[in-house]
Image: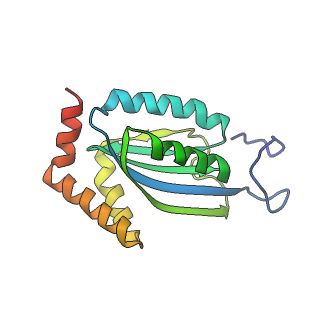
Amino acid sequence: MSADPSAASDEPRLASTGPPALYNLVYCSRAAPGVDQSVVDHIVARARQMNAQHQITGMLVFGAGVFFQWLEGPRGSVLALMALIKGDPRHHDVIQLTANEEVRERLFPDWDMELVGSEHIREVLSDAHATATEAPNKAALSRLLADLDAGALAELGAASRH
C-alpha cells in the first residue's frame, strides 16, 4: 500500500482523511503431505506478487505441518483469496479463526506476505486457542496442539521433506 494518501485505493473510507476500512481474516490449516519448505517458499513468492495486486497484506506462520495466516485488505479481495485457500489441495482442515472489518491502519503495511519462522507455531496456536470462541474451532486447535505435543505434526513435516 502506498504511503501517499492521494494514491488510488479500492478500500472504503469513512472520511477522506481517515484510515481505510480493512477486512482482516485469520485462519489456520494443516499442510497436506508433501508440503515442505520449498513449497511454502513458492507459496510466499506467489503471494507477494498477487497480494500486492489486490492490496492484501499479512503474515504467514508455517511450522510442524501447520499454516497460520493473518490477511488484511479490501473485503472482496480477502474473501476471494480465502476461497482459493479453502480449495487449495495443499491445505487440509482450514479453520477460520476470526474475521473483522474495521477502520484502522494496516498492521502489516509493508508485508505483501511475510513468512514467520516455525519456532513460533506453538505460541501462535496457543494464543489462537485461548481466544477461540466457537467450539469446533477450539476443538480443532486443541487437536493441532495435541498433535504438536505428540510430534505427529513434526513427523508430517519431516515426511514431506523426503
When asked about the image quadrant of residue 112, the answer is top right
Judge whether 144 appears above or below 61 on screen: below
Image quarter hosting the C terminus: top left
In the image, 151 versus 105, the foreground residue is: 151
Horizontal arrangement in the rendering, residue 50 relative to residue 2 (left or right): left
Q: Position of residue 44 (x, y in %)?
A: 47, 33
Horizontal arrangement in the rendering, residue 110 relative to residue 103 (left or right): left
Q: Position of residue 60 (x, y in %)?
A: 44, 44
Report the residue at 29% width, 46% height from top.
Answer: 119
Report the residue at 48% width, 39% height from top.
Answer: 114
Q: Position of residue 10 (x, y in %)?
A: 77, 46
Q: Position of residue 20 (x, y in %)?
A: 73, 55
When asked about the image quadrant of residue 13, the answer is bottom right
Image quarter hosting the N terminus: top right
Q: Is residue 58 visible?
A: yes
In the image, 148 versus 88, the foreground residue is: 88
Q: How is the image coloured?
A: rainbow
In the picture as drawn, the residue positioned furthest to the left comes out as: 150
Judge whether 139 appears above or below 23 on screen: below
Report the residue at 59% width, 63% height from top.
Answer: 100
